[in-house]
Image (cartoon, coloured by chain):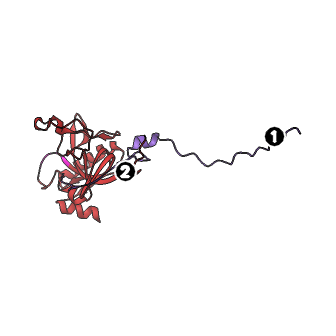
Amino acid sequence: VIRAPDYCEPVIGWRAWRAVESGGEIYLASVFHRVRWPFLDPLAGSCKALRAPWRRRHERHAPPSSDCLCGIYAASTLDVACAYAPGFPPCSPGPYGVVGTVALWGDVIEHTEGWRGSFAYPARLYVLFTGGRRAEHASRVAASLERYDVPVDTLQAGSRCDAVEALAA
Amino acid sequence: MKIGTEKRRYTVEPVRSPVPREREAEPRPAAPSSPAPVREPAKTHA
């Protein structure tokens, strides 16, 4: 029996990434997991919980599962996503924070403030910077992220609220 | 990421791929063509 999908348009939500520079290229990486988001290919979710010894009793399953926290996350509002963006407070060193929209599809679990999906690809990206010397580098990061072939911009934001206000305008 | 409590589950199969490269490879919808010529019914021998 072939089951018809419930929806034929991807779910669009907000999320945060790290822009990681490695081996001469800059790519998106998840904030919490060491997951690289591939250029021009969908990211397929996998359940990391199965690697944890105390979670071994879980059956192998395809993400997202209702019995697990696995899947690729997206928030329904920018405010929620920005809370996880690296780069705040402004003086923090390290990778650039990126926020933007993401398309989710496959199996999707809807939550009260977002979704978990089995496949994802970025839809629009904003590289956050706080001014000064980081502005120039943010432009370079944004240019590198154009390899995802989605719109990429830089966004000057000294705080999470600045970013939310700027993108809401 | 905290996204609240689970509400429901569904399947999503986008008609157009969200991945730009795959979208370009998708076949474009055929342009409307002129209607096929109407053939006259074959004459039958009485």
Q: Colour of chain B?
A: purple
Element type at mark 2: loop
Between A97 and A4, the residue placed more toward the observer is A4
Q: Visible in this render: residue B41?
A: yes
Between B20 and B2, the residue placed more toward the observer is B2
- Horizontal placement of B33 versus A116: left or right? right
Where residue A41 appears, as percent x and y from the top left, is 34, 39
- Horizontal placement of A148 versus A71: left or right? right
> Which chain is the one coloured red?
A
Dot 2 corresponds to which residue?
A: A10
Q: Residue at x 21, y 36 (%)?
A: A59
- Quadrant of the snapshot with the N terminus of chain A: top left
Report if residue A67 lies within the magenta region: no
Q: What numbered label is drawn on residue B42?
A: 1
Between A128 and A110, the residue placed more toward the observer is A110
Residue type at tag 1: Ala
Q: Are marks 2 and 1 on the same chain?
A: no
Where residue A69 appears, as percent x and y from the top left, is 19, 46
